[in-house]
Image (spheres, rainbow, N blue to C red):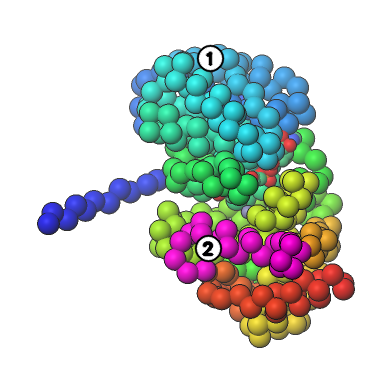
Amino acid sequence: VIVQRFAVPFEYPVHFTEEVLRPENRTLVEVIARCEPERRHRALVVVDEGLAASRPGLVEEIEAYFAAHADRLRLAGEVMRVPGGEAVKNDPAHVDRVRTRLYELHLDRQSFVVVFGGGAVQDMAGYAAATVHRGMRVVRLPSTVLAQNDAGLGVKNGISAFGTKNSLGTFAPPFAVIDDFALLSTLSRRDRIAGIAEAVKVALIRDAEFFAWLREKAGDLAALEEDATRWMVRRCAELHLRHIATGGDPFELGSTRPLDFGHWAAHRLEILSENRLRHGEAVAIGIALDSRYSVEAGLLSSGAFEEIFELLGTFGLPRYHELLAERDETGERRVFSGLDDFREHLGGELAVTLLARIGQGIEVHEIDRSAMERSIDWLAGR
Ligand SMILES: NC(=O)c1ccc[n+]([C@@H]2O[C@H](COP(=O)([O-])OP(=O)(O)OC[C@H]3O[C@@H](n4cnc5c(N)ncnc54)[C@H](O)[C@@H]3O)[C@@H](O)[C@H]2O)c1
Ligand SMILES: [Zn+2]
């Protein structure tokens, strides 16, 4: 036998800036040119329609930026617009269109795909870029709170297929990420609030102090106050990145996925609601449910649960949805198929993160469905 063994280190910068497209802001050009500072780099820029529509002139701003840095940057073709939101992950035509364009523009493995958009567009375009020529360099510019504090930072991409979220995709670390806080200014209140759910999630499993801070600043955050939002995004990004770097399993080879606290129900609720629920909103409901279940399972105190429940409420995040009560023909709650999806997706035995206390997640391998039903009924009662 020959045992083949090698390790590949990964490294990518995550920058925090404001007004990344002002010509005098050098973040983007330096990020792209960081490995070959003398070369002129070709890029296809992909933008989220939702962002483009609410920021008229975005395409012109991008063109002007590339023109101002023409010594280092070159647009390989016209800026490409793709629909925003889950629609772009639900129809494979979009990923196909991006792949075709990358191929037809003769972009190579050293070329860049620069993506401005929410988590859905990041996931879709990242997947397209990861599979053309077996992977191109991706620079992500997340444009939602959720994408800046979570979806845009990590090593995963993908689209939805077979009626299941994220069932096609790859692990592909980006070349760089740039969080431009000013991009968030056009975001709807609904999407800004939805993104806070991921902050609550990471605080609950990792950082009690951050949770206390979220409680203290809940009013400011709910009012979309800028400094508080900026700090929340930043702290959440740090915790998320630290988990990927030091959690021991960046490519999820094992069957646990602690950052997906609350997500087994969330992913199912997104599908069951035909995406009327935003990812962040579904996560808030998933957090409420798995926190309540943690109480039912004797892991979490009801006092701690009340703090969580109340905080989600202060943000105006949903904590229950009637779809949780729906049953299929066999009398089983429809949402429970999310547990099966979750296990199948990761392989091995089921692993669900619950809470031992605020700031500390705990892995369990079994969910008692009648206790989960009681948790749903409890939430319904509230
Ligand atoms: N890959 C990962 O690790 C990971 C992690 C978490 C979530 N996700 C995925 O991210 C997706 C959710 O992302 P999201 O919460 O960013 O929502 P989203 O991408 O669905 O965007 C929400 C809406 O905001 C619009 N939009 C985006 N930026 C805007 C801006 N600046 N101004 C105005 N409108 C804007 C979009 O067009 C869309 O209509 C889900 O598909 C989820 O599965 C992926
Ligand atoms: Zn999520």
Q: Is residue 229 magenta?
A: no
- Which contiguous range is marked in magenta? 327-350
Q: Residues within 10 Å of mark 2 (few under 14, many from 20)?
A: some
Q: Quadrant of ligand 1?
A: top right
Q: Residues within 10 Å of mark 1 (few under 14, many from 20)?
A: some
The answer to whether any part of residue 300 appears in the image is: no
Q: Position of residue 11 (x, y in %)?
A: 40, 45
Taking depth in this image into account, of 307 and 162 the one nearest to the observer is 162
Q: Earlier in the sequence, mark 2 or mark 1?
A: 1
Residue type beneath disc 2: Arg
- In this rendering, would 167 be left or right of 311? left
Location of residue 314 by image quarter: bottom right
The CA distance from mark 2 to mark 1 is 42 Å
Taking depth in this image into account, of 360 and 166 the one nearest to the observer is 166
Kindly identify which residue carries mark 1: 77
Q: Residue furthest front?
A: 329
Q: Is residue 334 magenta?
A: yes
Location of residue 334 by image quarter: bottom right
Q: Position of residue 37 (x, y in %)?
A: 38, 26
Q: Quadrant of the N terminus?
A: bottom left
Kindly identify which residue carries mark 2: 343
168 versus 115 height, above or below: below
Residue type beneath disc 1: Gly
